[in-house]
Image (cartoon, grey):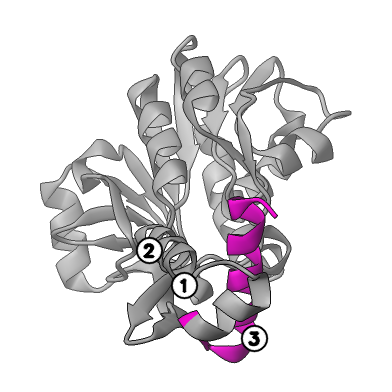
């Protein structure tokens, strides 16, 4: 059995039992306890679990943040539709748009089919499939697939994005924080978003109101790197002040 296969089985077990033991895993997979410890160390490095004496426990925060694409697509669907309607007029005919793999950005694409000559550069497998017959020119980045989010990531994805320049970078995130900025739960996807922001003239961040004052595993960018933020509700006054200071246009 390959190490990557064994680590996936370890994650399947810890998601079910919430805790695993080194001795138990050693017997289960017929490998040394040292091999199991190395597996747990790598999974802890990926922020998927926390090692404890004699074993490991599930990282509950990461598990709740890193929901599958299909589960995320059913959450807050009315809110995502509202955000999409607010954001659609920010896109013009002829625009080239870099789009991440978020379900919130995917909702906006349905409203853009009335536009002409739209080019979409994306790392989203789901987007490329769902809009394969839409009146868009779609460029897929290629790369390594993260099955949970249907996102392509890695060096091939980054290299592909760096070949292009776009009018707009269209992204979402796991949370925003006044001091920490725009946050993401997966480092590889965060890097992809960073490149999209760097390769675009303008950046649009689409988030629902639950993402305010929420942190995640890794910082994608400063709030000042965002040109326009579209959400579903008026944020509290302290956020209005922060966004004004950071020169972020707010639409809700």
Question: In terms of image quadrants, where is residue 99?
Answer: top right
Mark 2 lies on a secondary structure that is helix
Residue 76 seen anywhere in this rendered image of the structure:
no
| Residue at 45% from the left image edge and 58% from the top image edge | 207
Question: In terms of image quadrants, where is residue 195?
Answer: top left
Q: Nearer the viewer, residue 9 or 77?
A: 9
Mark 1 lies on a secondary structure that is helix
> Where 65 falls versus 19 (above or below)?
above
Q: Is residue 103 left or right of residue 189?
A: right
Q: Which mark is residue 16?
A: 3
C-alpha span from label 3 to label 2: 19 Å
Q: Which residues are magenta?
A: 1-22
Question: Mark 2 sits on what residue?
Answer: 41
Nearer mark to the viewer, of 1 and 3:
1
Q: Earlier in the sequence, mark 3 or mark 2?
A: 3
| Residue at 47% from the left image edge and 17% from the top image edge | 159
**Residue found at the far right of this picture:** 133
Residue 202 seen anywhere in this rendered image of the structure:
yes
C-alpha span from label 1 to label 2: 12 Å
Q: Is residue 91 left or right of residue 115?
A: left
Give x and y (percent) for residue 245: 10, 49
Question: Mark 1 sits on what residue?
Answer: 33
C-alpha span from label 1 to label 3: 21 Å
Dot 2: few (<14), some (14–19), or many (≥20) neighbours within 10 Å?
some
Q: Nearer the viewer, residue 17 or 133?
A: 17
Dot 3: few (<14), some (14–19), or many (≥20) neighbours within 10 Å?
few
């Amino acid at each position: 059995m390959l190490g990557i296969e064994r680590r996936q089985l370890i994650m399947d077990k810890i998601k079910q039992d919430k805790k695993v033991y080194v001795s138990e895993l050693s017997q289960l997979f017929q490998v040394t306890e040292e091999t199991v410890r190395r597996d747990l160390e790598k999974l802890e490095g990926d922020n998927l679990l926390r090692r404890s004496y004699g074993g490991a426990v599930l990282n509950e925060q990461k598990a709740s943040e890193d929901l599958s694409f299909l589960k995320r697509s059913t959450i807050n669907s009315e809110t995502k539709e509202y955000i999409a309607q607010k954001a659609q007029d920010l896109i013009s005919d002829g625009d080239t748009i870099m789009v991440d793999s978020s379900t919130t950005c995917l909702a906006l694409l349905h409203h853009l089919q009335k536009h002409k000559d739209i080019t979409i550069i994306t790392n989203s497998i789901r987007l490329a499939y769902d809009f394969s017959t839409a009146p868009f020119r779609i460029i897929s980045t290629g790369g390594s697939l993260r099955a949970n989010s249907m996102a392509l990531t890695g060096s091939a994805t980054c290299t592909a994005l760096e070949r292009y320049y776009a009018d707009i970078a269209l992204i979402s995130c796991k949370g925003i924080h006044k001091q920490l900025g725009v946050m993401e739960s997966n480092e590889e996807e965060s890097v992809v978003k960073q490149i999209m922001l760097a390769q675009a003239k303008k950046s649009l961040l689409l988030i629902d109101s639950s993402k305010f004052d929420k942190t995640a595993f890794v910082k994608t960018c400063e709030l000042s790197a965002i040109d326009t933020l579209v959400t579903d509700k008026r944020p509290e006054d302290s956020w209005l002040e922060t966004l004004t200071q950071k020169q972020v246009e707010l639409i809700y």
